[in-house]
Image (cartoon, rainbow, N blue to C red):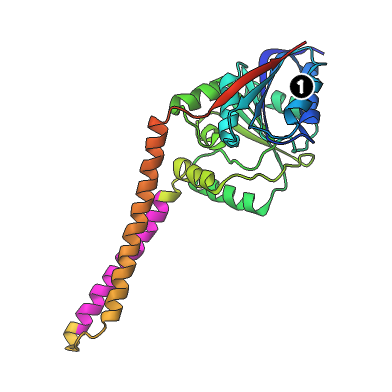
Amino acid sequence: MNKEKAFISAVIYVHNDSGTAAGFVETVYRKFTELFERFEIIVADDHSTDQTVETLRQISRDFSKPLTIIHMSSFQGKEAAMNAGIDMAIGDYIYQMESTQDQFDAELLGKAFEAMRGKYDIMSVAPRDTALSGRIFYQLFNASSGGSAQIGTECFSIVTRRAVNRVHAISEYLPYRKSAFAASGLPYQRMCSDSVRAHERNTSFSTGVESLLLYTRLGYRFSAVITGVMLLLAVAELIYTIVIFCMGIPIEGWTTLALFITFGFAGVFLIMSIVIRYLSLLLEIIFRRQRYLVSDVEIIQK
């Protein structure tokens, strides 16, 4: 069997995964040894406080290739840790693996690569069945993004160096990598398999909101709907006032007027909050330079 000669990187996220990290990393290493002539495995350790790192050190003693462990200086979340790993990766292709608790046939590592090579810049490997909350979020995202790429829950993905360079050219700070790659405009493919079981993701609410605001038109559409409702209320109030005036009936409904005013101000403040959120995200992206903090990088080799 001829091995792939392109340099391959794998970035694996861990956080207090002492029960699964070692077996997962070892499986990836063994399969990569069969498939690729040159590769590296980078583990992004998000400040684990259990025996995760020690178990990785133990299994890596039998590896013929180095195992790189990035130690985050504090718990900073999956996106920051994965960004740190991607920034360090030097491969022509980069596997992104966000959880060592995901279950899939190791053969998919090679099948996904063969399916994307020369055709796509982003390949997502996903389960056919996902949690209801995940389905709702991604349906909302895909319906509002306006792009052709349909993202969803995934076990791992592969991106080319060109894809990484493209998204970094757009923005050095990636608050949500999956959305950024899908919005890059590069060829994207999603491979679903019954043999894939994704561990439930704990993506924060704020990260989900940021991704919807940055990569979809949802905020604009929502504000447009609110503006339309406020306009209809204003027209209704005008018609009501004209009718009352023409009929010669004294206006006693100050409560009704106060209600209209309240709704009006509520709509204005809601639109302002969306605008302010957009501005804060833009300022963060433009001026934020310290995307993550790494305490040290450990390279384990024979």
Residue in the picture at 45% in, 41% down: 214
The quadrant in which residue 73 appears is top right
Q: Say what secondary structure mark 1 lies in.
A: helix
Q: Nearer the viewer, residue 191 or 84?
A: 84
Image x and y of residue 130, in percent: 70, 48
Considering only vertical position in the picture, is 13 above or below 141?
above
Bin the neighbour count of mark 1 within 10 Å (Cα to Cα): few under 14, some 14-19, many 20 and up.
some
Assess whether residue 2 is covered by the magenta stretch: no
The quadrant in which residue 233 appears is bottom left
Kind of residue at badge 1 = Arg
Image x and y of residue 223, in percent: 38, 55
Q: Is residue 174 left or right of residue 248?
A: right
Q: Quadrant of the N terminus?
A: top right
Whether residue 111 is visible to the viewer of this picture, yes or no, is no
- Region rendered in magenta: 220-244
Whether residue 131 is visible to the viewer of this picture, yes or no, is yes
Image x and y of residue 157, in percent: 65, 31
Considering only vertical position in the picture, is 195 above or below 262?
above
Q: Is residue 142 left or right of residue 223?
A: right
The quadrant in which residue 70 appears is top right
Q: Quadrant of the C terminus?
A: top right
Q: Which residue is mark 1?
A: 57
Image x and y of residue 170, in percent: 44, 28
Considering only vertical position in the picture, is 257 above or below 277?
below
